[in-house]
C-alpha cells in the first residue's frame, strides 16, 4: 500500500501526494459522491462521519461533521471553486474551530498512469503559522488513515 508523502514547498503550502490503485474516474467519484465520501473520509479509529452534505458543482457548498468515540464533534464546511472532472477540484474550507487561522484553499489533482491514480493535494494556508500548526496537529496521520479506508473502498468498487 502506498503511503502519504508530504512536502512544504512554500511558507504557506503543504503538498500531499498519495498513489491509489484505481482509475482516475473511480477516485474522482469517491471525492464527489457523499455516499462514497462518508465511507472513507474518516479520522482515526473510533471516529464516524454523521454529516456529509455535498452540492458538487462550482459554487456548491459542502459540510462534514466527524464524531469521536467520546462524542466530540469536529465540523468543517466549504465551497467548490473549480471542478474539471475527472482531473481537478479546487475548493475552500474552514473548520468550525478555525484552527487553521482562516479559510484554506485546496487544489486536488488526479493523474492516471497505467490504471493507477496519483492524488496530489495542494493546501494553501493564510499564514506560515497556520501551515505549521496544521502540520503539527497530526493531520497527516488522520489523512493516511482515511486514504487507507479509500484503498479498501476502491478495491471493493473495482
Image (cartoon, helix red, strand yellow):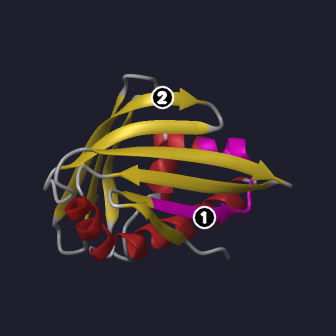
Q: Is residue 72 left or right of residue 89?
A: left
x 50%, y 62%: residue: 16
Q: Quadrant of residue 135?
A: bottom left
Residues at badges 2 and 1 in contact (C-beta under 8 Å)? no
- Residues rendered magenta in the picture: 15-28
Q: Residue 112 location in percent, x, y? A: 76, 49
Residue 56 in sight here: no
Q: Residue 118 location in percent, x, y? A: 67, 57
x 49%, y 70%: residue: 6
On whether residue 139 falls in the magenta region, the answer is: no
| 3 and 15: which is toward the camera | 15
Q: Which mark is residue 115?
A: none
Whichever of labels 2 and 1 marks the residue nearer the N terminus, that label is 1
Q: Quadrant of residue 41?
A: bottom left
Residue beneath label 1, please?
18
On whether residue 19 falls in the magenta region, the answer is: yes
Residue beneath label 2, please?
82
x 33%, y 39%: residue: 92
Q: Residue 129 location in percent, x, y? A: 20, 64
Q: Does residue 69 sit above or below 154 in this rendering? A: below
Residue 34 in sight here: yes
Amino acid at each position: 500500500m502506498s503511503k502519504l508523502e508530504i512536502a512544504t514547498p512554500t511558507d504557506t503550502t503543504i503538498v500531499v501526494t498519495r498513489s491509489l490503485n484505481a482509475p482516475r474516474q473511480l477516485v474522482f467519484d469517491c471525492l464527489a459522491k457523499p455516499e462514497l465520501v462518508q465511507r472513507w473520509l474518516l479520522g482515526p479509529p473510533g471516529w464516524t462521519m454523521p454529516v456529509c452534505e455535498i452540492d458538487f458543482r462550482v459554487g456548491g457548498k459542502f459540510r462534514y461533521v466527524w464524531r469521536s468515540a467520546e462524542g466530540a464533534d469536529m465540523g468543517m464546511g466549504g465551497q467548490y471553486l473549480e471542478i474539471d472532472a475527472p482531473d481537478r477540484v479546487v475548493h475552500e474550507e474552514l473548520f468550525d474551530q478555525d484552527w487553521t487561522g482562516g479559510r484554506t484553499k485546496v487544489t486536488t489533482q488526479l493523474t492516471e498512469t497505467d490504471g493507477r491514480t496519483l492524488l496530489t493535494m495542494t493546501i494553501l494556508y493564510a499564514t506560515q503559522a497556520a501551515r505549521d500548526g496544521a502540520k503539527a496537529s497530526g493531520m497527516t496521520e488522520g489523512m493516511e488513515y482515511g486514504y487507507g479506508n479509500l484503498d479498501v473502498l476502491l478495491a471493493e468498487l473495482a
